[in-house]
Image (spheres, rainbow, N blue to C red):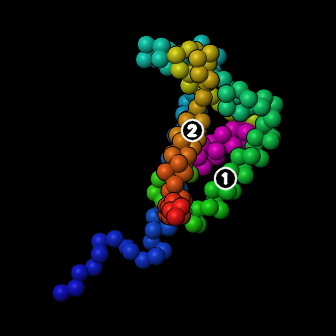
C-alpha cells in the first residue's frame, strides 16, 4: 500500500503557496483600506473628530496631500510614482519568493501601497494629485501625539517591520538563510 503526502512537495509548490499568501494579504489590506475610507468619508465628513476607547483613538477626517507624518506636502505625483515603483518591485520579486514571513510582509506593503495609490489617482483634486484619506488618530483628535493615518499606512508599517525583522534575522525572501563564515 502506497501513501501519498498530504501536501504538494514539488519544487514549484512552495513559491505558488508563498505567492498566494502575498496576494491574499495584499487583497485583504486593500479591501479593508478602501472600505474603511469609504465609510470614514461617509460618516465623518464635516464632523468633529469622534472619540473612541476613552480618548485613546479618535476618528478625524483628514485629506493628506503629502506622505506619512505630513512629509512631502504637494509632492503627490512623485509619491504616486514611488508607489508604482514599490508595487513593480514587489511584483518582480514575487517570482523568487519562498519565505512565508517575507510573503506576508510584502503582501501587506503591496496592499497598503495600492490603497494609498488609489487615493492619489482617483480622489480630488485630480489624477496624480489626489489626497489620501486619513482618519485614525491616537490619543489626540488632531494628530499632535501621533500623525493621523489610515489602514494602508498601518499595513505598510507592520509589513515593513516584518521585512526588516526577517532581514535582521538574516532570512532572505528566497528562503535562504545567511550563514556567518568562520574567521579561521
What residue do we see at 58% from left, 66% from top? 95
Mark number displayed over residue 87: 1
Can you name the residue that lies furthest to the front here? 184
Q: Can residue 31 be seen in this view?
A: no
| Residue 10 percent coordinates (x, y) | 42, 77
Q: Mark 2 points at which residue?
A: 157
Residue 168 painted magenta: no
In this rendering, the answer to whether 111 lies above or below 55 is: below
Seen from the viewer's position, the closer of residues 180 and 1 is 180
Q: What stretch is highlighted in magenta?
A: 107-123
Mark 1 vs 2: CB contact within 8 A: no
**SS at circle 1:** helix
Secondary structure mostly seen in the magenta stretch: helix
The answer for how far apart the CA atoms under marks 1 and 2 are is: 15 Å
| Residue 172 percent coordinates (x, y) | 54, 59
Name the quadrant containing residue 14: bottom left
Amino acid at each position: 500500500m502506497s501513501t501519498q503526502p498530504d501536501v504538494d512537495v514539488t519544487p514549484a509548490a512552495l513559491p505558488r503557496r508563498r505567492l498566494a499568501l502575498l496576494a491574499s494579504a495584499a487583497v485583504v489590506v486593500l479591501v479593508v483600506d478602501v472600505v474603511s475610507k469609504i465609510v470614514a468619508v461617509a460618516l465623518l465628513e464635516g464632523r468633529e473628530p469622534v472619540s473612541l476607547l476613552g480618548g485613546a483613538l479618535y476618528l478625524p477626517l483628514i485629506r493628506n496631500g503629502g506622505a506619512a507624518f505630513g512629509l512631502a506636502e504637494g509632492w503627490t505625483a512623485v509619491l504616486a510614482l514611488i508607489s508604482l515603483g514599490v508595487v513593480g518591485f514587489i511584483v518582480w520579486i514575487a517570482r523568487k519568493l519562498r519565505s512565508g514571513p517575507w510573503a506576508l510582509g510584502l503582501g501587506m506593503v503591496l496592499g497598503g501601497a495600492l490603497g494609498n495609490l488609489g487615493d492619489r489617482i482617483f480622489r480630488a483634486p485630480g489624477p496624480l494629485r489626489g489626497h489620501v484619506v486619513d482618519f485614525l488618530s491616537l490619543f489626540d483628535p488632531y494628530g499632535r501625539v501621533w500623525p493621523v493615518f489610515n489602514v494602508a499606512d498601518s499595513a505598510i508599517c507592520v509589513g515593513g517591520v516584518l521585512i526588516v525583522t526577517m532581514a535582521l534575522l538574516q532570512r532572505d525572501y528566497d528562503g535562504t538563510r545567511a550563514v556567518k563564515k568562520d574567521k579561521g
